[in-house]
Image: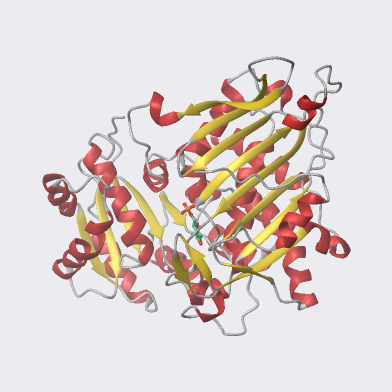
Amino acid sequence: MQTDSSFTFVLFGGTGDLSMRKILPALYEAHRAGGMLADSGKIVAVARHAADRGEYIQWVNEHVKPHVSKNGVDETAWSSFLERIEFVKIDLGNPEDFALLRDAVKDLPGIRVFYLATGPSLFVPICRALASVGLNENARIVLEKPLGYDLKSSNAINDAVGEIFAEEQIYRIDHYLGKEPVQNLLALRFGNALFEPLWRREWVESIQITIAEELGVEARGDFYDNTGALRDMVQNHLLQLLSIVAMEPPHSMDSDSVRDEKLRVLRALKPINPLDIGKVAVRGQYHSGVIRGNAVPAYATEPGVKPNSTTETFVALKVEIENWRWAGVPFFLRTGKRLADRVAEIVVNFRAVPHSALGASALRAGANRLVIRLQPNETIRLYCLAKQPGEGMNLASVHLDLAFDQFFREGQMEAYQRLLLDVINGRLALFVRRDEQEAAWRWVEPILNEWKASNKPPKPYAAGTWGPAAASAMLAQHGTCWLEEEN
Ligand code: BG6
């Protein structure tokens, strides 16, 4: 990919965790690959924890370098990457400091991108300060999640930012949309004629979407304790995945065609009736346990977490979509920290044949199932029934496997790298539009409210397991169970 679009990429929160782990390593990878970033493009880091450029570069060497490329650092590329970096010391609490930023970028080339890798409470003050020195014009602004805490606070941020930047200047990040396998889901669904006729209520019995993590809350206890899994993972990543799985074929892959179709799904989600919440939503919190042979502590004893915290670290939901394609098909979503495995996958359970001429063994062997594994190893597995060799007609479940790394030599591009390149090149398709975000908040909010009002503690689960038993019981009500495959 060749580009000549020059840019000035201003990174607020330049010494923050996200800049260190994701943003700067992604920019380095794009630089190292060659041809993806215009040679004249500059990165302007904004922070107050470094005195000057020299000190900032030292910080980048110490803290960012360990996070770049699993295959080692290319020293020549690394030093030319550092040459792209400028630094401005700004106290974000002091709007007058933004004149320094204006002066620093005024002669730099290309489109201006302002990346707010800061807490959401700073989004509006930063946007206003940028506008006060005229830096909002013809620029792009990137907002990290979480964007707000609920519908009201998210609307307040969107309204205020919307007074300064037009919607097409705003890039709301959901890094799941930048993952290669999520892109591939679009290719699978809309590049193949094979699946589309079956992708509907007549043939699909249920769908599961899981994002399971082995990690706990790491150093983010304070943030997480005020957030919980529903806001951290469901409102954004899981509902985005759901909308891609369930959407109608878009007219084209341009940004609004895709986002319009996702929005239709989000708006068609059946509202949760507070009286049914116990039947369709399970919340859990991890206690101490063992993961891969290592003892891990309980959530409530993690640094930054209140000892009597009732924040959920696990959520399982039954979701329905009220439209012709999906009416009556349950979508089961789950996510959690400190689970038995790190895996993100989508399981499409097809209906059994309407009449089995092949006898009881066919029924025992089960129905067709498509398992789309997004991470850690991207694969697609289609379960079919086949005759067992030998006498008689005994059927067994077998599978067809598609492992992407066997077909494509090139390594996958990291989500952040793809998304940052999209911002620089003005491609909005993989960013969340305001109406999508609102629809997602509108749907999750009754669950948050009901959980708060009922004041019930989350169900405990031991770290290293698949979550509270109630999550399995919820599926058992529908005659099914969570699929847990070996990695
Ligand atoms: C982030 C959440 O958005 O996604 C984290 O805030 C979570 O809590 C992370 O760990 C998971 O992302 P990934 O790409 O590692 O699956």
The part of the image, by quadrant, that contains residue 473 is bottom right
Residue at 38% over, 46% down: 420
Give x and y (percent) for residue 53.
17, 66
Residue at 40% over, 41% down: 418
The quarter of the image holding the N terminus is top left
Give x and y (percent) for residue 351.
78, 30
Asked if residue 91 is positioned above or below residue 438 in the image, the reply reads below
Residue extending furthest toward the bottom: 307
The part of the image, by quadrant, that contains residue 136 is bottom left
**Residue 253 visible, this angle:** no
Residue at 61% over, 46% down: 484
Give x and y (percent) for residue 210.
61, 49
Q: Is residue 18 left or right of residue 437?
A: left
Residue at 50% over, 55% down: 165
For the residue pair 453 and 19, the one nearer the viewer reads as: 453
Render colour scheme: secondary structure
Q: Is residue 24 left or right of residue 447?
A: left
